[in-house]
Image (cartoon, rainbow, N blue to C red):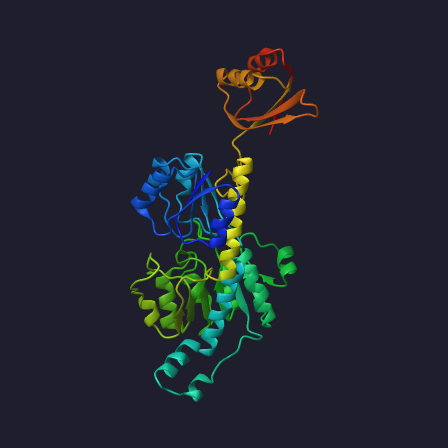
Amino acid sequence: MKVLVADKFEDSGRRGLAEIGCEVAYEPDVSGESLLASVKATRADVVVVRSTQITRAMLEAANLQLVVRAGAGTNTIDVEAASERGIWVANCPGKNAIAVAELALGLMLALDRRISEGTADLKGGKWNKKEYGKASGLFGRTLGVLGTGTIGCEVIARAQAFGMPVVAWSRGLTDARAAELGIRRMASATEVAAAADILSVHLALKPETKGFVGDGVFASMKQGAMFINTSRAEVVDQAALERAIKERGIRAGLDVFAEEPSGGSGAVEAPIFQLPGVIGTHHIGASTDQAQEAIAEETVRIVRLFKETGRPANVVNLAKKSPATHLLAVRHYDRVGVLAAVFDCLKKGGINVQETENIVFDGARAAVARIHVDRAPADEVVSALRTCTSDVIDVSLVAL
């Protein structure tokens, strides 16, 4: 199996891919047309990326079988185009959760203690202990969390270690789960914002979360409260955040922002960082050695499973619900051509197969083909299935 790694990737991950028998091409600086050319030149079956864009054009022109995002989010991959061509898309969820959570807490501390400003003054030869000796402290202050996935939960655990009560909202958060986490579940994001001294965002970027944190949330926040975003820039209406900073004294710690450059280095023009009480980092939430080693290990596991079984782990583009309406169970002798005859009957009857599984019994003399179909076969199709070959033992149909 040929694997093209088209982004920076740990040595341990490249060694791991080679050790499982993959032919690895490492080209961390390719993108766009050069990436497409590399995929074609290497005849890659699998491409591994971090922030590199995988476009529809690439997926349609290449003959890829699997795209692995060496990280959690898949917004840089055209997942829809991959699904249309039957290309698996997999990711490494949760492997960078601790790294992101640590940065979120670091931004809270840096805002509260004004570490960035104090350091800048020291570098400029200015001593002002009286000014920088003012801080509220985190102990006893309420943290509001939007999104209680893996990263959100890691943030909650660390905040609780600081002695912070936590309120949270997430679409999937139940009262029972909130009780397990030792937090208070709120009915909406605005309720979380109203109760919190610090609001931290950990929402995945989806169509329904784009611009989700906007004027309503910021208007609900306490005057002078902190806002932390280490998730995705797009989940926040940045214009609304800027208004809240100017009008309500909101202080912000941002690892992601709207004007973020696409490359690894270069100039940045982000007016939000000129506002008072705003600090930032360079989209480095997941960038610790520990997180990258864990992601590399998970990437190898994904590719190994695909190589050995034909199905990778952590697939993100499978149908949530099959369009199948009926299950057709064909009990048959385990002989050559039986399934071909069965599928030929279904084809003639205009029946589309959605999923299929052939289960072989001990001794390999008989098997059951479990075939999910898109509609109930007519009686004459079922009769044809029973007689399409003498190796069919029985046929049954169940509505799903």
Q: Is residue 91 left or right of residue 279?
A: right
Whole-percent x, y for residue 224 in the image: 44, 74
Q: Quadrant of residue 334?
A: top right
Q: Where is residue 105 shown, x and y percent of the image? A: 51, 68
Foreground pick, 133 / 124:
124
Quadrant of image for the C terminus: top right
What percent of the width, then of the height, locates residue 49? 42, 49
Between 2 and 294, the one nearer to me in the picture: 2
Image position of 259 (left or right of 19): left
Query: Is residue 50 rendered to the left or right of residue 145?
Result: left
Residue shown at the point (46%, 61%) measured from the top left: 287
Residue, x 54% and y 46% (percent of image)? 301
Point out residue 245 in the picture as x, y percentages from the top left corner: 38, 70
Q: Work out whether 285 lies above or below 53.
A: below
Residue 314 in view, yes or no: no
Is 345 drawn above or below residue 320 in the view shown?
A: above
Number of numbered labels in the structure image: 0
Residue 176 at least partly seen? yes
